[in-house]
Amino acid sequence: MRGKIIKGIAGFYYVYAEDDVTYACKARGIFRKDKQKPLVGDDVEFTITDTKDLEGSIDRILPRRNQLIRPAVANVDQALIIFAVKDPEPNFLTLDRFLVMMGMQNIPVTISFSKTDLVPEEEAERLRAVYDTTGYTVLCTSLEMEKGIEEVRHFLAGKTTVVAGPSGVGKSSLTNYLSGDILMETGDISRKLKRGKQTTRHAQVIPIGKDTFLVDTPGFTSLSLTGLEEQELKGFFPEFRPFEENCRFLGCRHIHEPDCGVKEALQDGQISGQRYADYVSLFQELAEQRRY
């Protein structure tokens, strides 16, 4: 039988099978011998060993389309990155860091600004406008008002999507809503700290429709851009590209160089000041990493 690994805990891999039943499976010893470890998201072939207790043995891992390192998950089609417009306040440097990280792994990203019922409509639209110029799709959602949720459903349909973002932005609440009968632990926001309690401890795949899966990931506070050189960073800021032909120097890094088309576009308001500031911060961080 075939299925998809939706969770891995304590040596067991929970496989959601083609008969819509989930089996607790052990991986055969041959995987350890071949130094191959099953991942959440893997499509597998397995044998049912106990029909009563719904147990099985994984025989084969089917070829992976891709593999993410962080979170450790296979066969991802796209990512939905969720940031609240308020409670907690959005950290745009973290958002831009995540966009770069997904770009490094060639994973298409859509941004969702959640909890838009907590701010005036023009504030949510201001945030949308910042990222609309980057080439990323931006959704403004409110679970409380059921705003934008059908757009999210359409985006997810028929795909395996990593859902990520800081704790407290409503990832688990959205997943609960979309999955219907699959309940997940949801944390309350701390009134004092304005921080969500991190509730998702392991990446897990949640079936929410035909050929439609969400990969729920632990909340994050920082992400390392390991393996990226500072001169490569500009390639992950797509809004720079139309203006780079106006740079005097080939290979301009858009930091200190004179006659820089990107900095001229920044001064003219054609590039977001927030995005450019995050670019400079990440550039300096990567330069420091290389130095040490």
Image: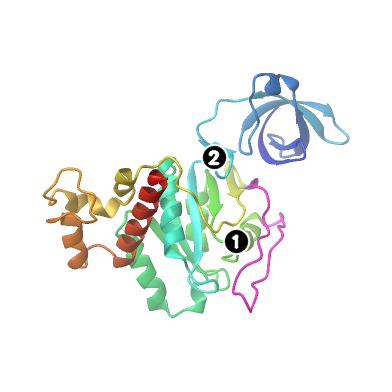
Q: Write down the residue under mark 1.
A: 174
Q: In the rendered structure, which segment of residues is drawn in magenta?
A: 180-207
> In what element is the residue under mark 1?
helix
Going 39% across and 53% down the picture, which residue do you hit? Answer: 285
Q: Residues within 10 Å of mark 1 (few under 14, many from 20)?
A: some
Residue 292: x and y in percent read 42, 45
Label 2 sits on residue: 69
- Disc count in the image? 2
Q: Nearer the viewer, residue 118 or 92?
A: 92
Residue 258 quadrant: bottom left
Residue at x-position 22% and y-position 63%: 266
Which residue type carries mark 1? Leu
SS at mark 2? Answer: loop
Q: Main secondary structure of the magenta part?
A: loop
The image shows residue 249, relative to residue 121, as above or below, that is above
Provide residue 53's location: percent of width, then percent of height.
87, 36
Residue 51 lies left or right of residue 121; in this view the side is right
Sequence-earlier tag: 2 or 1: 2
Mark 2 residue type: Ile
Residue 196 is covered by the magenta coloring: yes
Observer-nearest residue: 24 or 211?
24
Dot 2 crowding, Cα within 10 Å, few <14, some 14–19, many 20+: few
